[in-house]
Each structure stands twice: as structure tokens, then as C-alpha cells.
Image (cartoon, rainbow, N blue to C red):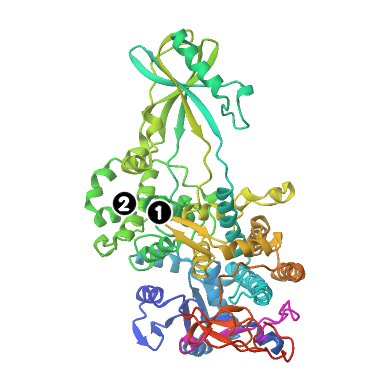
């Protein structure tokens, strides 16, 4: 029997329909000599630390850390046990297994961890899908890969899971126990990607809080020549400027205004006109899609990922979303006509737009050398029903569609003119643009108007040559103030996570890092942000992400290595090396274990101080209490537990009992 192992039921049904496997059975579909089964994402999970020894159980003890498994254990998730039993039984009958999970690192792990747990020894093949419409599924079935080709993705995914487990389990336990001894009763979650991401937010918030605005002045002269009015900016001498070339001398600025008014004219000293060409934006990768949707619609990163996944799985409208690449393989140009036909059937109002496109035009997006595991997100060859989409789904779909259509229009071209002028011995400059070829921007008129991106293209200067004289119509010194950076939004945080190298100051490390080395992957960044929100480290105010006080306290106590985006990006780069066969999993884990041990050793020496909320005294011993969460909800528990078991209900402000002398604790404990 040939068994297709899918990631989720919907994916299984799509593939089974093409294979003709229509016979319904518990947890699978069969027919024509094949069987299609599925998981619900991961059916297995890493075993908890206590599986490696009772010393790692509750209560947690700092003294036994780090826990560094030599023989890793997996366990079946309780809520997926029934489906796992179905797959386990099917594997005993299968001569060939075709991995048909999502075509990425995580999809590879979902399938192969099952095969390894069940000790499957048969043949393994890989179905590599970029879209779930019938035509794409048939094309992928005709080009099934040998399993050995994608095995390195599993090893890289395994490395990521184990590295995250080691950091998360060890550092979370270490700092949570230390914090509890100082009265903080909640878990302090620490993560290999989560922590440096949180540090970006904390540092940005602190930069804003500590920002002191500084005044500066711009001098703008109103000029006129040939009946055309325009403005020119004063270029102040260095002696009047700060390090950003802003004039910080108001007296000088006012004197220049008076000079312009007295002189009454300005002479063109230099003129340069260049033809500037702007290529169409690439089809979306997931990160760029999340950034654009955050800016335009205010959508969260996880929301965009869920929408893109729905467009891919449910509506069959777009291709695989969890991609880090915006380029397209040249071979897909053969499918252009089919895609355009599908788009017209989906939305007949596009006919006028499509009639203007040049299907033979080759944009920069078509580049085999730039393709990674997946190509950019584009519409599929199958018509879809937009009426069945929610409004957010339609918004995202139309953006994806727009970026694809843009590949079939010419580059946007403008003539950019820059002039220098002399007014009473002071230098001024002005610039303007004239659109020569609108090209792909004709599709983006509404988007550009909303984003304010077209303003520069509409600025025109009069026809002038060197030596021509302009009349001064006015001059003004505008008082300005420097502005703090903006708080992160989910979109701008995704952008920061994608390019961690920008935050690296160590020249040696910066040189090692690739330009695109980032925190996490396209598939995991949204989940990291959701984790920070759910664990109370970050709150959302409007569209902005703000760190909570406990997040700042945690960042102050953690070692610099753990917070450094550059160090974490190095590990991501190492995982890429595993996927490419340039590094072994064992070598990676040896280095990761050494790093974990080093972090634990440093953490033991750290002073833990968490700013605690006001708390009632213990009703038994009179000592301080900490907020705890139990089966019945939140309560205040004595900091000396289990030596003292006094508690106060969360809604009570004061204890009802008079404190008594606390009994001596029977011994040290992990709290």
C-alpha cells in the first residue's frame, strides 16, 4: 500500500480527491491502491523534563539545571491519540509513505517525527506542494521527490525544536524559581527567539521614554520662474548644524530669511536631470505581506498568516503562504495564461485591467537563482468564489493579486531634476519629478493615494538652465523638533525580526551574519508575537505594541547573550546550514548545549528583581504574599510556602485572620 501522510484533514481531502481515494474510513480515505491519512498539525510533542529524571519534576529546583537530554524522547499528545493510532496501524501496512505535509521545515518534522517514533523502515517519498488547487496537486504528483532530498529539512526542524526546548525549559525554570524567592508568583517565560524579540520592544519603549526633543530650523524660500512657483530648501553651513545636518542656530536661520527678502532673487548654479526607473514590487513573501497588511489595514501578524492560510487551503485562491521568497521560477511563465483566465472568471471586472497587461513582459520577479524552498505568494490557476471570502480575506487576496498583475506592466519611469541655487551667497536646493512612463503604478493609484507615496512624482520644477534667475516670493524659518522613534507595530516588528543584522554592533558578528539573517522564520514570527501578548509581556494599544513593567524587569536581569538578536540569528543561520547539508544536527546540538549551560551558569549569578504589585500580608505569618494561579483561579499565597500555607482570596484587600508566628520551614525547596 502507498500511504500519503498529510498535515491536516482538509489537505488530505484535497489530495485524496485527485488520487481517487474516495472510500471513507476512520481517520483516512482510500481507493485505487492508495490511502490518504492526516494529522492535526503535530501529533507528537517533546517530553517534559521530568521524563528525564524525577529531579526535574515539581517543585522546580535551580540546583539540578541544566537538563540536557542525550537521548531525546517524544510523547503522543493526549488529544491526538486516536488519530495517531490510526496512522500507526496504517504504517504497518504501507510499503511506501509519501510525505504530503506542508512543504517546509515544520511540515517535514510533523511527518518524519511520526515515522521515527513508529520506527517505519519502508520507502519514503515527498510530495512538494505550492498550491492545493487540482492542477497544482496533479503537477506535484507527477514530480514526486525522493524522501532523501528533503530529509535535511527534518534535521533542521529537529534542531530548532530541541534548541528551543533546551533554552525554554532551562532558562524559564531558572528565572521563575529565582523570581519566586523574591515574591513574584508567575512563570517568567524565556525563549531563544521570544526573548530577543521582547528586548527589541523594551529597548524601543525606553528610547521613546528617554527621548529629549531638540529644536532645529528649516528655511524654505518660495520661488517663481517662467510662471511656475516652487519651493527650495536652505542648505546650512556645517557650523550651524548638528550631526544630522540640521540647523540648530535660530539666529542664523532668521538672518537667511531676511537675506532672501532683501536679495529678492536666486540664481541657478547647478542642474541635473536623470531618468529614474522603479521596478514593480515583487510578489509577496509572508513577512512583507504581514507588514503591508499591518500598515494598510491594521491587521495583526497572526491574523494575516491565518488569512493567507485560509486563502491557500480553503479557497484554493493563492499559493503556499509560509514563504520567505518573493521571486518566481521562470518555468511558471508557462502558467500565466491559465492564471489570468482564472482571475477573470473569479472577478470579471478585471477584464479591462488584464487587457492592458503585456503577458510577454519579463519583470525582475522571474529569477530561478533567487528561489528558496518556495516561490512568492501568487493567485492559483483555479477560479475561486470571492463572495465566500470574509472582508479581510478579500482585502488580502486583492493585494496578492495586485502584486502579481504588476509583473506584466513596464517599469515606472520619471525624470528627476535636482537644482542648486544661490540667494545672497546662501545655497538652496530644490527637486522635482515628471512622470515619463506610469507603468505598473497605474494599478496602484488608490494604494499610493492612501499611503502618500505619489507626492514626489507630482512635484514639477519650471524649465530652467544654469545661470537662470528666479524671483523670491517669500521666505520662512520653520521651527521643528526632533521626534522619537515610533513604537513598534506588528508589521514593523516583523520587519525588524526579518533583519536582525541591523541591530548587531559587533563588526565580526555583523560580517558573519547574512544580510537576511533574522529572528525566527516566516512561519514562526507571528506565533512569537502572540506568545508575548498572551504571556503578558506585551500589550497592544491601538496598533502599537508596548512592553509591560515585568518585561522590562526581565530584560534587566537576563544575560546580554540571550537578548542579542545577532546571536539568535546566528543559530537560525546554522539551522539553514543543516537544511542545506553544510552542518550536522549533532554539531549544532553540541554547540547549543554548551551555550545553554553557559547561560544557566550566568543566570545563577544574576540578581533577580521584579517590581511587584501591592499585595496583602499573609494572614498566618504576616509575611509578604505573591499572586498565584490555581485550579480555582487567582489568589495571594504566602512567599514562605510550603513552610507557611496562608492564602488570601484575590478579591480580598485585607486578611481576615490575625497573623501568628510562622513555624520554621522543614527544609529548602524549589520555590
Q: Of the numbered discs in the image, which one, if any, rests on residue 293?
A: 1
* Image location (x, y in percent) of residue 533: 49, 66
**Residue 226 located left or right of residue 106:** left
Residues at marks 2 and 1 touching, judged by CB atoms closer than 8 Å: no
Other residues around mark 2 within 10 Å, as few (<14) / some (14–19) / many (≥20): many
Residue at image point 45% right, 47% down: 282
Where does label 2 land, which residue?
A: 340
**Residue 37, placed above or below residue 308:** below
* Image location (x, y in percent) of residue 30: 39, 84
**Does the magenta portion include 407?**
no
Residue at image point 34% right, 68% down: 314
* Image location (x, y in percent) of residue 40: 45, 78
Q: Of the numbered discs in the image, which one, if any, rests on residue 396?
A: none
The kind of secondary structure the magenta stretch mainly shows is loop
- Viewer-side residue, 145 vs 172: 172
- Viewer-side residue, 94 vs 24: 24
Q: Which residues are magenta?
A: 57-84
Q: Describe the element under mark 2 as helix, strand or loop.
A: helix
- Viewer-side residue, 664 vs 232: 664
**Residue 560 located left or right of residue 350:** right
**Residue 21, placed above or below residue 273:** below
Q: How many marks can you see?
A: 2
* Image location (x, y in percent) of residue 632: 48, 87
Residue at image point 38% right, 26% down: 459
**Does the magenta portion include 71?**
yes
| Sequence-first tag of 2 and 1 | 1
- Viewer-side residue, 223 vs 657: 657
**Residue 663, placed above or below residue 182:** below
Amino acid at each position: 500500500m502507498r500511504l500519503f501522510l498529510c498535515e491536516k484533514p482538509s489537505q488530505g481531502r484535497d489530495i485524496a480527491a485527485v488520487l481517487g481515494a474516495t472510500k471513507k474510513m476512520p481517520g483516512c480515505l482510500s481507493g485505487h491502491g492508495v490511502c490518504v491519512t492526516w494529522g492535526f498539525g503535530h501529533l507528537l510533542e517533546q517530553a517534559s523534563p521530568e521524563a528525564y529524571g524525577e529531579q526535574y519534576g515539581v517543585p522546580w529546583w535551580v540546583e539540578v539545571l541544566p537538563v540536557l537530554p542525550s537521548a531525546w524522547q517524544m510523547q503522543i499528545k493526549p488529544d491526538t491519540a486516536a488519530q495517531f493510532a490510526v496512522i500507526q496501524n496504517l504504517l504497518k501496512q504501507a510499503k511506501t509513505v509519501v510525505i504530503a505535509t506542508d512543504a517546509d521545515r515544520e511540515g517535514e518534522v510533523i511527518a518524519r517525527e511520526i515515522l521515527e517514533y513508529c520506527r517505519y523502515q519502508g520507502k519514503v517519498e515527498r510530495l512538494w506542494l505550492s498550491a492545493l488547487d487540482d492542477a497544482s496537486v496533479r503537477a506535484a504528483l507527477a514530480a514526486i521527490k525522493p524522501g532523501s532530498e528533503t530529509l535535511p529539512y527534518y534535521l533542521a526542524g529537529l534542531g530548532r525544536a530541541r534548541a528551543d526546548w533546551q533554552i525554554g525549559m532551562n532558562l524559564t525554570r531558572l528565572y521563575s524559581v529565582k523570581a519566586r524567592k523574591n515574591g513574584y508568583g508567575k512563570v517568567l517565560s524565556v525563549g531563544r527567539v521570544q526573548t530577543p524579540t521582547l528586548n527589541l520592544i523594551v529597548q524601543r519603549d525606553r528610547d521613546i521614554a528617554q527621548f529629549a526633543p531638540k529644536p532645529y530650523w528649516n528655511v524654505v524660500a518660495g520661488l517663481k520662474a517662467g510662471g511656475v512657483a516652487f519651493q527650495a530648501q536652505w542648505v546650512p553651513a556645517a557650523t550651524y548644524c548638528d550631526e544630522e545636518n540640521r540647523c540648530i542656530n535660530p539666529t542664523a536661520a532668521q538672518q537667511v530669511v531676511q537675506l532672501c527678502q532683501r536679495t529678492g532673487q536666486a540664481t541657478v548654479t547647478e542642474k541635473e536631470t536623470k531618468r529614474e526607473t522603479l521596478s514593480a514590487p515583487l510578489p509577496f513573501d509572508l513577512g512583507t505581506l504581514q507588514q503591508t497588511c499591518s500598515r494598510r489595514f491594521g491587521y495583526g501578524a497572526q491574523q494575516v498568516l491565518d488569512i493567507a492560510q485560509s486563502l491557500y487551503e480553503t479557497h484554493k485562491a493563492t499559493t503556499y503562504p509560509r514563504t520567505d521568497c518573493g521571486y518566481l521560477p521562470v518555468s511558471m511563465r508557462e502558467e500565466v495564461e491559465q492564471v489570468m483566465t482564472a482571475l477573470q472568471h473569479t472577478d470579471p471586472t478585471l477584464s479591462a485591467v488584464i487587457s492592458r497587461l503585456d503577458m510577454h513582459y519579463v519583470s525582475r520577479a522571474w529569477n530561478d537563482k533567487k528561489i528558496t524552498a518556495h516561490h512568492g505568494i501568487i493567485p492559483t490557476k483555479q477560479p475561486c468564489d470571492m463572495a465566500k471570502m470574509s472582508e479581510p480575506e478579500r482585502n488580502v487576496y486583492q493585494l496578492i493579486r495586485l502584486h502579481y498583475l504588476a509583473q506584466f506592466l513596464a517599469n515606472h519611469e520619471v525624470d528627476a531634476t535636482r537644482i542648486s541655487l544661490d540667494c545672497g551667497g546662501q545655497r538652496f536646493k530644490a527637486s522635482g519629478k515628471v512622470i515619463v512612463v506610469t507603468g505598473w503604478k497605474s494599478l496602484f493609484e488608490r494604494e499610493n493615494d492612501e499611503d502618500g507615496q505619489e507626492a514626489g512624482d507630482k512635484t514639477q520644477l519650471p524649465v530652467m538652465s544654469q545661470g537662470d534667475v528666479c524671483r523670491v516670493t517669500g521666505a520662512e524659518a520653520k521651527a521643528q523638533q526632533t521626534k522619537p522613534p515610533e513604537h513598534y507595530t506588528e508589521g514593523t516588528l516583523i520587519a525588524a525580526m526579518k533583519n536582525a543584522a541591523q541591530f548587531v554592533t559587533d563588526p565580526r558578528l555583523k560580517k558573519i551574519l547574512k544580510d537576511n539573517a533574522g529572528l525566527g522564520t516566516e512561519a514562526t514570527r507571528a506565533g512569537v508575537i502572540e506568545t508575548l501578548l498572551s504571556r503578558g509581556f506585551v500589550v497592544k494599544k491601538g496598533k502599537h505594541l508596548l512592553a509591560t513593567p515585568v518585561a522590562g524587569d526581565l530584560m534587566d536581569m537576563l544575560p546580554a547573550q540571550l537578548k542579542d538578536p545577532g546571536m539568535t540569528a546566528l543559530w537560525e543561520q546554522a539551522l539553514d546550514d543543516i537544511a542545506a547539508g553544510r552542518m550536522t544536527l549533532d554539531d549544532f546540538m553540541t554547540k547549543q548545549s554548551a551555550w545553554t549551560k553557559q547561560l544557566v551558569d550566568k543566570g545563577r549569578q544574576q540578581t533577580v528583581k521584579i517590581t511587584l504589585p501591592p499585595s496583602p500580608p499573609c494572614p498566618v505569618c504576616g509575611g509578604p504574599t505573591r499572586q498565584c494561579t490555581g485550579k480555582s483561579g487567582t489568589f495571594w499565597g504566602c512567599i514562605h510556602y510550603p513552610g507557611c500555607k496562608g492564602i488570601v482570596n484575590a478579591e480580598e484587600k485585607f486578611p481576615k485572620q490575625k497573623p501568628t508566628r510562622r513555624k520554621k520551614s522543614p527544609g529548602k525547596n524549589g520555590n
